[in-house]
Image (spheres, grey):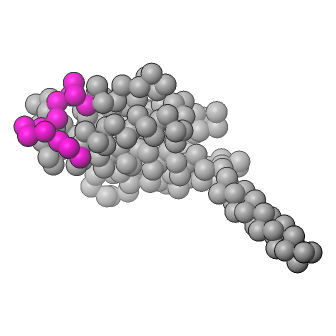
Amino acid sequence: DAFLGVVAKILELIEEGGGSVEKAAISAAAVHEEYPEFVGFVEHLFSHADADGDGSLTAEEAQHLIELLRTHVASSVMGLGSEEFDEAVGGIFELLSEAPEGGITKEALLKAATSEEHPELLEVAEELFAQADQDGDGVLDEAEAELFADLLEDYIGDDSSAGSSGDDEADESADETESASTDEGAEGA
């Protein structure tokens, strides 16, 4: 997989830099002839990880980037965007929107994330829970639940944009072709 090669280059850069790395180096590592969108996607992840916005990652920020990359790679394997995945994620958002008084426990969230078709979603939910549970009490309060929802939306949005291979253009082309043939049929009648 081309993206796995890019991730390997980025991990190597972080290791060589003693845990820190500059944005320009990450961008250069993301360049791929067949998939030019990798650069923008990796820069987007870099921006999320660069907490102080200085254009370079500290060892702690680099670790966050590694977690984001690992989550994305897992989502690629899972088939993010499939109908089954969307249904599984829908259960999580439903739980978040109807948060019980006292917060959402990790167990309740993982139960909502359980999916026969996508067992890997449990790992993703667990990782995002750990990031969102800022006070470490094992329960998401209202603000932490909102953070979890944002992280999950970023996760879903990031994968969808990175995985785009021009299918939208193909769909538009097919729509135009169908429209043209319908117009021609109407003219011949």
Vertical relation: 164 (above or below) 1: below
Q: Decide: is 120 above or below 153.
A: above
The picture places residue 83, in percent across and down from the top left corner, at 52, 39
Q: Residue at x 36, y 25 (%)?
A: 114
Q: Is residue 168 above or below residue 20?
A: below
Query: Which quadrant does the N terminus fall into?
Result: top right
On screen, residue 189 versus residue 113, left or right, reads right
Count of numbered badges drawn on the protein = 0
**Can you name the residue that lies furthest to the right here?**
188
* Residue 100 is one of the magenta-drawn residues: yes
Magenta region: which residues?
Answer: 97-109
Q: Residue furthest left?
A: 102
Residue 49 appears anywhere in the view: no
Q: Residue 59: which quarter of the image?
A: top left
**Can you give x and y, in whole percent of width and height, for residue 78 in the image?**
51, 30
**Residue at 37% from the left image edge and 31% from the top image edge:** 124
Q: Nearer the viewer, residue 188 or 166?
A: 188
Residue drawn at point x = 7 percent, y = 37 percent = 102
Left or right, 63 with respect to 14, comes to left
Residue at left offset 32%, top offset 58%: 54
Q: Which quadrant holds the C terminus? A: bottom right
> Which quadrant holds residue 181?
bottom right
For the residue pair 68 and 147, the one nearer the viewer reads as 147
